[in-house]
Image (spheres, helix red, strand yellow):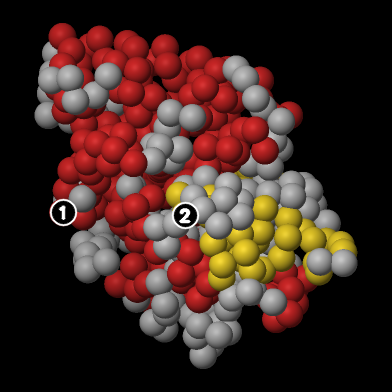
Amino acid sequence: MTTSTDEGRFFDLGDLSFDVTAPVVHEAREADWYVRTNYGFAVLRYAEANAILKDRRFCQGTIRWPDQNGVHTGPFHDWWGKVLLSLEGADHTRIRRLLFPAFKQRPVAAMAPRFQRIATDLIDGFAARGEVELVSEFAEPYSSRIICGLLGLPDSEWSQVAHWADDLGKSFGVNLKADLPRIEGALTGLYGYVDQLVADRTAHPTDDLVSQLIAAQQAERLSAEELGVALVFLVFAGMETTRNQLTLALQTFFAHPDQWRLLGERPELGRNAVEEIMRVNPTVTWITREALEDVEINGLVIPKGGIVQLLSHATGTDPRAMEETGFDITSPRPMHMGFGGGVHHCLGHFVARIDMAVALPLLAMRMPDARPDGPGEWLPVSGNTGAIRFPIRFTPETRRPDPVALATPSGW
């Protein structure tokens, strides 16, 4: 919903029918660099959003998300206040430093052949049929199996992990309060799973991330509670966002079939394709920041404690920041904000970038004429978005192609 007040336009970002990519948002961007919303100020232009991300007078602000949605107590409220997204200062730095080695570019890039094997195995399962339900048959198992591999979990457990991650992922949505029973049920399931995992790795340590974090906890660099919170967050966050972003990628490519064919012909463009997709159609539709003091920006005073939402699509397609805003996987662009920025830049961005840079060219090569088979079912285009169901049709594959040697994505 958008309305006009004496103070200018107002967007209801919690309205399930509101679309943050709609023309009304672009029109507002031309009128001014911000609008007022029920979740604070929404920043619509690239320059101001980029400046706020780098401004140390702002902190993450995500910790207030449950309260903004009427959730003031309970397991989810308590857990949300302890996740890496919500932490600031020394605790944020300490926990991020412990997690960071596993998410550096080199170890993640070394997993690209594994990502390719998973993607190929899944595509082999439907290529000859000429149809696929993208979420359940590719995006979800692909992203979940990758997270299982990263954390050293058995590949056979991806389905249960994905079920919990899907329900917990609703915590990023604007329908949070209505979804709270499923969210808290997923928390209970994941905590039980993580407790068993920690007990197993404590008794039988390996060289995986879980064992490394247990060692940090035993060395008193991480409390037992922090260990559990971190593992639950890692299990769901990496799966949910990659799954959603893959569905949004195909949605965008289907609106630009020439770009889809180009990606299939030139798989080395996978890296560029990921960046371009996240610029024009990101799953994270806004990035939250909170003012630590009164901040004046271009005539607007954001009071101490004031919330700003940096709208990813509006800023990523701002004509003031680039000559051409259309979708083109061959064109260089300013850095998008799909992974946030500053000290809260997404820890798992290399995982997301590399696994999608592997998957998208393989899909384009194996389904060159893919197109939607009906409208599908989608989350609201506000908060975190993506497909719930996305049926696709294409010409059935009559012969499995020879394996393709994809260049290891690097250089971000």
> Residue 164, percent across and down?
51, 25
Please state if 49 lies on the left or on the right of 381 as rendered: left
Which label lies toward us, 2 or 1? 2
Q: Nearer the viewer, residue 264 or 61?
A: 61
Q: Is residue 198 visible?
A: yes
Please state if 377 lies on the left or on the right of 334 as rendered: right
Identify the residue at horizontal 40%, vertical 72% (top origin): 335
**Position above or below: 72 against 294:** above
Q: Which of 168 and 328 is in front in this view?
A: 168
Secondary structure type for disc 2: strand
Please state if 342 lies on the left or on the right of 203 as rendered: right
Q: Which mark is residue 58?
A: 2
| Residue 93 position by quadrant | top left
| Residue 69 position by quadrant | top right
Residue density around tag 2, few if under 14, some if 14–19, many if 20 or more, within 10 Å: many
Identify the residue at horizontal 56%, vertical 23% (top origin): 76
Secondary structure type for disc 1: helix
Q: Which of 156 and 99 is in front in this view?
A: 99
Report which residue position mark 1 lands on: 106
> Residue 103, percent across and down?
24, 46
Q: Can residue 286 be seen in this view?
A: no
- The C terminus, quarter of image: bottom left
| Residue 283 position by quadrant | bottom right
Going from N to C along the chain, the mark reached first, 2 or 1, is 2
**Position above or below: 16 against 353:** above
> Residue 408, percent across and down?
21, 62
Residue lying farthest to the bottom in this orientation: 323
- The N terminus, quarter of image: bottom right
**Position above or below: 268 against 68:** below
Amino acid on which the number 1 mark rests in the picture: Arg
Amino acid on which the number 2 mark rests in the picture: Phe
